Image (spheres, helix red, strand yellow):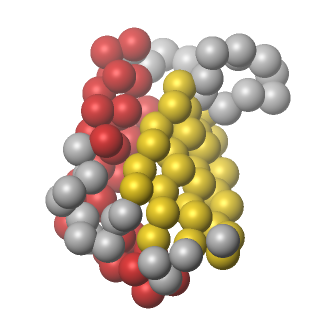
Amino acid sequence: MIKHIVMWKFKDDVAEADKLEMKRRLESLKGVVPSLLQIEIGMDIVGTDQSKDIVLTTLFHSLSDLQAYADDPAHLQVGAFIKPLVCERAVVDYEI
């Protein structure tokens, strides 16, 4: 199994509605991308200098399933929405 975690920092001028829409669009990938087994999105509630603003945690059977997710048109469409909202992105992929 592969756990895929992505954390983002929003640009300063991003509206709260766009932040919530990002969360909603990420959640909408469940049941749409066949290789995606689980998805969870969380918004930071502490807000320290070290915090990111939003985190995505997903689960896949294999690295090839993760790649299929990365290449899926629905995922690419959500990514296009996200890109102008964020200024930082960090990713960790690991086997469990």
Please report the residue visible at 35 percent of the width from the left and 22 percent of the height from the top.
20
Where is residue 36? Give x, y as percent.
35, 65
Left or right of 34 on screen, residue 36: right
Which picture quadrant has residue 85?
Answer: top left
Could you tell me which quadrant the C terminus lies in? bottom right
| Residue at the farthest bottom position | 64
Where residue 77 sits in the image (x, y, percent)? Answer: 24, 54
User: x and y percent of residue 61 in the render?
Assistant: 46, 78
Q: Quadrant of the N terminus?
A: bottom right
Quarter of the image for residue 11 reads: top right
Residue 72 spot, x, y in % from top left: 26, 70
Q: Residue at x 27, y 52 (%)?
A: 30
> Which residue is painted at 73% across and 28% down in the image?
51
Camera-side residue: 29 or 91?
A: 29
**Res 15 seen here:** yes
Classify residue 35 by image quadrant: bottom left
Instruction: Tell whether 67 sits left or right of 93.
Output: left
Q: Is residue 84 above or below residue 89?
A: above
